Amino acid sequence: MNDVLIILFAANGFDKGAQGLAGAGRRLAGESGGSLRAVVLGEGAETLAQEVARVADAVVVADQAELSEYQPETYLNALAQVCRESKPRAVLLGNDTYSQELTPRLAHRLGGSAAGDGVEVRVDGDALRVGRQVYGGKAHAVLELKKSPAVVWLRARSFAPAAPRETSGDVTRAALDIQADTRTRVVERRREAGGESRLEEARVIVSGGRGIGGPEGFETELRPLAELLGAQLAASRAACDAGWVPPTWQVGQTGKKVTPELYLAVAITGASQHMAGISEAKTIAAINTDPDAPIFKHSRFGIVEDYRKVVPLLREKLKRVLGAGF
Ligand SMILES: Cc1cc2nc3c(=O)[nH]c(=O)nc-3n(C[C@H](O)[C@H](O)[C@H](O)COP(=O)(O)OP(=O)(O)OC[C@H]3O[C@@H](n4cnc5c(N)ncnc54)[C@H](O)[C@@H]3O)c2cc1C
């Protein structure tokens, strides 16, 4: 079959990542001459499936009790069943942690091939080609996946969304034979501190590095600035490793890949591993005391100054521009 199957999680809704995944899947299905299918897993899958059906040809709802919450082995069993039935040529996932965990395991179960962190995907004869950034974004590699199905996780938010279809695709409920797998068990779930929404979805990000000097700099200087800008807070690995902010704030090669309209890097040097996470940011601005800091090479706007002097001035200026109420 030449169909493309995208995998979506009900808990994430039809966010920018899911929309980008549908866009990538639609284009790939067009190149293969197949249809775009989707499977939606988890509690609330039915609601998301109706939205996805506006851009996909067929949507499978997998919301059985065993799938109400993410559990890797059980999800893997369910997905392997869906894939064996629909026999897609390619299976696409997003860049959330569930997808990154499932991709290689699903490919192995299906006897296919796997790749991750794709920023482009296209058909080339019998193979699938996946482009990805390497060496912290300094070079671009193209992988050729010859064994079908190709299971690939993409930086989904970088892809343009799919246009809605004139008629919605069919939505069917999967009849899966699922045995809950007990090899691993979720013992606790914790909401991120402050209940911040997901960094990957943020339009504006204020990010701090080691030069912030401690957790109080994030709280007293960066947080008020982020609030004025309606921005999410993030950090370099150095700041996360120091324990100043939660590890979930980390942006970069081993952290989150973000795609904001504006990324303000405060006291971040701009190491290649950090830049790997922000290469899709539309505009980068930086504040750094070192005029030779690599971050300035990637920045549209830059201020060479101590952030403790600049950030309060920026806040004052923003309050004036935004008017009363702030
Ligand atoms: C395999 C691997 C994976 C990695 N993955 C990641 C990753 O995902 N994300 C990541 O971020 N890093 C990652 N790193 C680490 C990366 O190489 C850098 O060490 C890290 O990004 C440095 O963080 P930083 O810029 O905050 O700190 P530093 O390099 O210490 O830079 C601090 C900056 O703050 C400036 N500064 C100091 N004081 C002030 C002040 N008062 N006002 C303004 N500016 C000031 C300094 O001039 C300097 O440029 C990885 C490394 C490896 C080896």
Image (cartoon, rainbow, N blue to C red):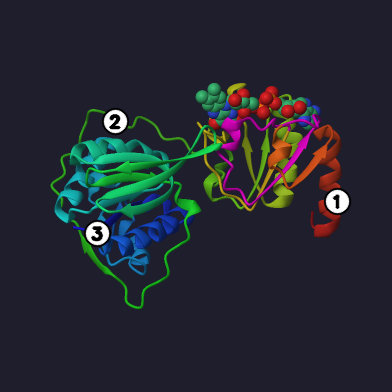
The one of 262 and 2 positioned closer to us in this rendering: 2
Q: Secondary structure at mark 1?
A: helix
Q: Main secondary structure of the magenta part?
A: loop
Q: Position of residue 309 (x, y in %)?
A: 86, 35
Which residue lies at the image location 44% right of the left edge and 51% below the top edge? 156
Q: Give the mark toward the camera: 3 or 2.
A: 3
Q: Which mark is residue 317?
A: 1
Which residue lies at the image location 15% right of the left edge and 49% below the top edge? 84
Q: Secondary structure at mark 3?
A: loop
The one of 113 and 193 positioned closer to us in this rendering: 113
- Identify the image quadrant of the C terminus: bottom right
Q: Is residue 65 left or right of residue 270?
A: left
Q: Give the mark toward the camera: 2 or 1.
A: 1
Which residue lies at the image location 32% right of the left edge and 56% below the top edge? 45
* Amino acid at dot 3: Asp
In this figure, which residue is indicated by the disc labeled 3?
A: 3
The one of 158 and 56 positioned closer to us in this rendering: 158
Magenta region, residue range: 267-293
* Amino acid at dot 2: Arg
Q: Give the mark toward the camera: 1 or 3.
A: 3
